[in-house]
Image (tube, rainbow, N blue to C red):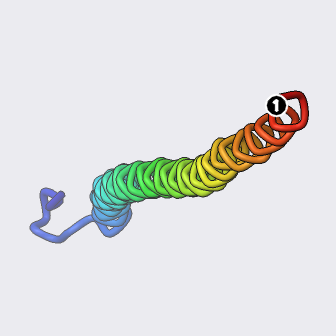
């Protein structure tokens, strides 16, 4: 850029500085865009990680509710089974009493006949 007189051509030097400035601007812009893309990818990865955690938590909660529901059903069935056992046992003891009454009545009838 120096002229044959030893002086600088300011127009040429201005163009040179403008080109360098444009190159630096493009490089810095590219670096900024790359950094933003890396940050975006990190955020997406973090989001995917948290979404997986949330999904797993939902699955575990559903499994827990199903287990509790199943336990409640089993508890109610056990209560009902005990109730039925009591009722059956009570009814089975009644025929013995009924049989005793019947035997007594039969013996009285047989006494009357003989």
Give the residue drawn at x 32%, y 69%: 10
User: Residue 4 appears at what percent x and percent y?
Assistant: 13, 57
Give the residue drawn at x 48%, y 48%: 63
Question: 103 or 32: nearer the eye?
Answer: 103
Asked whether, in this view, residue 69 is left or right of residue 109, the answer is left
Report if residue 22 is visible in the image.
Answer: no
Q: Residues within 10 Å of mark 1 (few under 14, many from 20)?
A: few
Question: Residue 10, relative to residue 81: is it above or below?
Answer: below
Asked whether, in this view, residue 61 is left or right of residue 30, the answer is right
User: Residue 88 appears at what percent x and percent y?
Assistant: 66, 44
User: Residue 79 appears at what percent x and percent y?
Assistant: 60, 57
Give the residue drawn at x 81%, y 37%: 111
Q: Residue furthest front?
A: 114
Question: 86 or 57: nearer the eye?
Answer: 86
Q: Which residue does the numbered mark 1 point to in the structure image?
A: 110
Q: Quadrant of the C terminus?
A: top right
Question: 112 or 73: nearer the eye?
Answer: 112
Numbered circles on residues, count: 1
Report if residue 86 is visible in the image.
Answer: yes
Q: Quadrant of the N terminus?
A: bottom left
Give the quadrant of residue 106. top right
Question: 26 or 17: nearer the eye?
Answer: 26
Asked whether, in this view, residue 75 is left or right of residue 21, the answer is right
User: Residue 35 appears at what percent x and percent y?
Assistant: 31, 58
> Which element is circle 1 on?
helix
Give the residue drawn at x 57%, y 53%: 82
Asked whether, in this view, residue 41 is left or right of residue 104, the answer is left
């Amino acid at each position: 850029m120096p002229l044959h007189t030893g002086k600088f051509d300011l127009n040429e030097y201005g163009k040179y500085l403008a080109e360098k400035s444009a190159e630096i601007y493009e490089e810095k812009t590219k670096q900024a865009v790359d950094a933003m893309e890396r940050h975006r990818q990190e955020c997406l990865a973090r989001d995917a990680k948290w979404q997986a955690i949330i999904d797993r938590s939902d699955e575990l909660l559903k499994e827990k509710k199903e287990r509790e529901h199943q336990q409640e059903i089993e508890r109610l069935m056990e209560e009902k089974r005990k109730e039925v056992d009591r009722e059956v046992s009570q009814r089975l003891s009644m025929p013995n009493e009924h049989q005793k009454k019947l035997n007594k009545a039969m013996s009285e009838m047989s006494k009357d006949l003989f």
